[in-house]
Image (cartoon, helix red, strand yellow):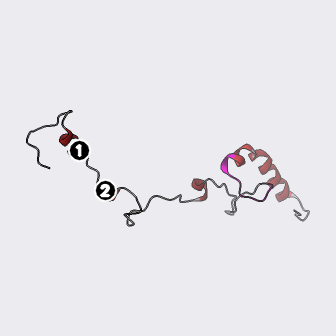
Amino acid sequence: MERTHHGQHEDCFGCKVHSIQVNPYAMPSRLHPSNPPAKPKNSWEKGIPTDSRGMPFLNKNGQIMGQKEYAANRHSIEETRRRLHNSTEPVTP
């Protein structure tokens, strides 16, 4: 696009469009596989809290627990884990 005037003007569409300097290949999309969209790197970014071994916490139904549910029940979960860790009895479900 060739401009016939110098400087930028607020009412000139050509100046507005010319001032945007974003390379279309910099935007992640399925059309540019060399630059894929960012994915969560770890379980915390995915919203899944895990213990020190990397195992996700499960709720009473046996499904993976989310961060909000873990945060709401954190004290009781930690108390149960501490009790099971310090007990000498075998663990039964």
Q: Residue furthest top?
A: 10
Say which amino acid is labelled 1. Val
Quote the CA–CA distance across marks 1 and 2.
14 Å
Q: Residue furthest right?
A: 89
Q: Which image quarter is the C terminus in?
A: bottom right
**Residue 20 horizontal/vertical position (percent):** 26, 46
Give, as a single range, the part of the protein colored magenta: 60-68
For the residues labelled 1 and 2, say whether their Cβ atoms are less than 8 Å apart: no
Report whether 23 appears left or right of 80: left
Q: Residue furthest left?
A: 4
Main secondary structure along the magenta-highlighted residues: loop
Label of residue 17 in the image: 1
Q: Residue at x 33, y 57 (%)?
A: 26
Say which element carries label 1: helix
**Residue 64 horizontal/vertical position (percent):** 71, 58
Q: Within the image, what quadrant is residue 29 found in? A: bottom left
Say which amino acid is labelled 2. Pro
Q: Residue at x 36, y 55 (%)?
A: 27
Residue for badge 2: 24
**Residue 92 horizontal/vertical position (percent):** 89, 63
The total of numbered circles placed on residues is 2
Residues 56 and 9: in front is 9
